[in-house]
Image (cartoon, helix red, strand yellow):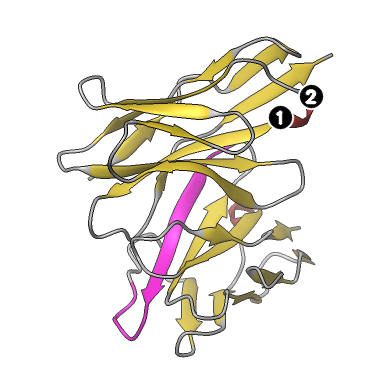
Amino acid sequence: GAGVSQSPSNKVTEKGKDVELRCDPISGHTALYWYRQRLGQGLEFLIYFQGNSAPDKSGLPSDRFSAERTGESVSTLTIQRTQQEDSAVYLCASSLSPVQPQHFGDGTRLSIL
Amino acid sequence: AQSVTQLDSQVPVFEEAPVELRCNYSSSVSVYLFWYVQYPNQGLQLLLKYLSGSTLVESINGFEAEFNKSQTSFHLRKPSVHISDTAEYFCAVTRRGNTDKLIFGTGTRLQVFP
């Protein structure tokens, strides 16, 4: 079935490099969310897109983090000048509307050396 | 703002034993409540949800959770667990009527032993 697709599944990079993570939501889902899951911790909200509304960026931890979404399709999460504390699994989720449950991708495991 | 507390980080249990994973939330407004499950090396999957109506909700694989407004709890239970239930379980809350970001608990790792 066509679930939420994230790429790459794993990314290893050196400290200071920029990385770009991609999320393909389920077709027709207007809401898209990015979360971060650090080892042994819960999920941390990063950013939320809903249709053409201004995104809710309240969870982005620093200005090194940014995200874009093209219409109601693909989203990219960019981390500039990566730091070791950025190492985590980055999860994307989408939902039909804000009041519907979210469907998660398998995540991108990011490791900063 | 909403918050979620999962008091137990790990719950070890033997197969066929009952289990309860605790979840308490804090909110000044009405909420929707969810349990998500994350099997090893997989993404999160919705296990069950409370939006309105009956306070007891069930999943297709035998889990149930009861919304208790007075105790602000949404504990997850199963009368008899299987090895395959071994996973990380996350409780989550969002504001009723305007769901945007889910607020997750820190998770409970359920380890089922034979």
Chain ID for label 1? Answer: B
Assign a secondary structure to mark 2.
helix
Image spot of residue A82 (x, y percent)? 62, 66
Kind of residue sitting beneath label 2:
Ile
Kind of residue sitting beneath label 1:
Asp
Image spot of residue A36 (x, y percent)? 54, 55
Extreme-bottom residue of the structure: A71
* Marks 2 and 1 on same chain: yes
Residue ID at (26%, 43%)? B31
Q: Is residue B76 magenta?
A: no
Mark 2 residue crowding within 10 angstroms, few (<14) / some (14–19) / many (20+): some
Q: Where does the magenta region start and end?
A: A41-55
Query: Splitting the image into 4 quarters, where does residue A12 fall?
Result: bottom right
Q: Is A111 on the left-hand or right-hand side of B35? A: right
Residue ID at (43%, 55%)? A45
Q: Is residue A61 visible?
A: no
From the image, tell me which residue sits under label 1: B85
Distance from disc 2 to disc 1, alpha carbons, whole Å, reads 5 Å
